[in-house]
Amino acid sequence: MTTAKLNKASEQLAFGGRQIRFTHSSEVLHCEMQFSVFLPPQAEHKAVPAVYWLSGLTCNDENFSAKAGAQRAAAELGLALIIPDTSPRGEDVPDDADGAFDFGLGAGFYVNATQKPWQKHYQMYDYILHELPALVEAELPLNEERAISGHSMGGHGALVIGLNNTEKYRSISAFSPVCNPTDCPWGRKAFSHYLGDDKSLWQAYDASILLRAKVSAPPILVDQGTADNFLEEQLKTQALEAANKESNNGAQIRYQEGYDHSYYFIATFIEEHLRFHAGNLSSKQNI
Ligand SMILES: N[C@@H](CCC(=O)N[C@@H](CS)C(=O)NCC(=O)O)C(=O)O
């Protein structure tokens, strides 16, 4: 399945479907990128809908592919999984001066950077919203139905990209999302560097601010573990709950007793998230 624009780096069978890793040259990010895809068995004979998965800090496409165990349910439900990296990559791409895990490489925060030296490569919002879907929908057996999900920084990305582009995503879900990045240390650090000091420009990337202003959000499911070490200081789930209540949007925001921030938590509930998305995508006709 190497195409003019996609180079296949690896492929494995999983649950009758195919787990594939591609590399490609990104025009938006100005670098070589890698991403993973799971194509369910149904994709052998028809175009299928896709769930985009955005990972968290320090991850690339392999964390979710290897640890979440999402392929079995995706194969049953006829859902493709599109799993991008979390930042631009390569020797030319600037990184945090101290190599910190919460900014720079592995920490693109799904924004379009406007500040030097970040703005040349750190355009992850446009990569996820425009370049990657156009690429995979042209090259792979996908229809144009999309849902979006993610974890932590990627949960923030899924909520923000989904809420800002409701015509493009049928449903949104998140595990342990950074709910109010304009008001937490990870978000303030990333946004001040990528977007500059004008905090009014940060608001379009804050899920709680977006949900509060939304009249009619698409279906949303959020799971948050109560034993998550990042909950109080970084994730601020209560801000999203308050925005949901004020705007009457009916997002399901669930606390899962005793679960932490890890992929064990994601693996436990990913099937419920995929069934939730399948119920909003045409693959539900296959169930
Ligand atoms: N390395 C960080 C934690 C980073 C972290 O927890 N990353 C999450 C996303 S925010 C993750 O998914 N890590 C990769 C993994 O668990 O496979 C620390 O020491 O505090």
Image: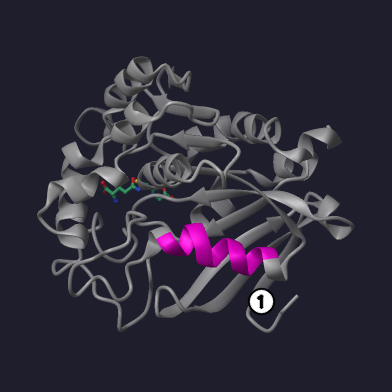
Distance from mark 1 CB to nearest ligand 1 atom below 8 Å: no
Badge 1 is on which residue?
8
Q: Can the viewer see residue 86?
A: no
Name the magenta segment's main secondary structure: helix
Which image quarter holds the C terminus? top right
Residue drawn at point x = 56 percent, y = 44 percent: 167
Let me know if residue 37 is in the magenta part: no
> What's drawn in magenta, residue-wise?
126-137
- In the rendered structure, the answer to whether residue 140 lies left or right of residue 29 reads right
Badge 1, how many Cα within 10 Å: few under 14, some, many 20+?
Answer: some
Which image quarter holds the N terminus? bottom right
Question: What SS does tag 1 mark?
Answer: strand
- In the rendered structure, the answer to whether residue 169 lies left or right of residue 89 reads right
Residue drawn at point x = 17 percent, y = 37 percent: 183
Q: Is residue 74 above or below residue 119?
A: above
Give x and y (percent) for residue 221. Answer: 51, 28
- Displayed quadrant of residue 279: top right
Q: Can the viewer see residue 138?
A: yes
Give x and y (percent) for residue 118. Answer: 24, 71
Q: Is residue 198 above or below residue 36?
A: above
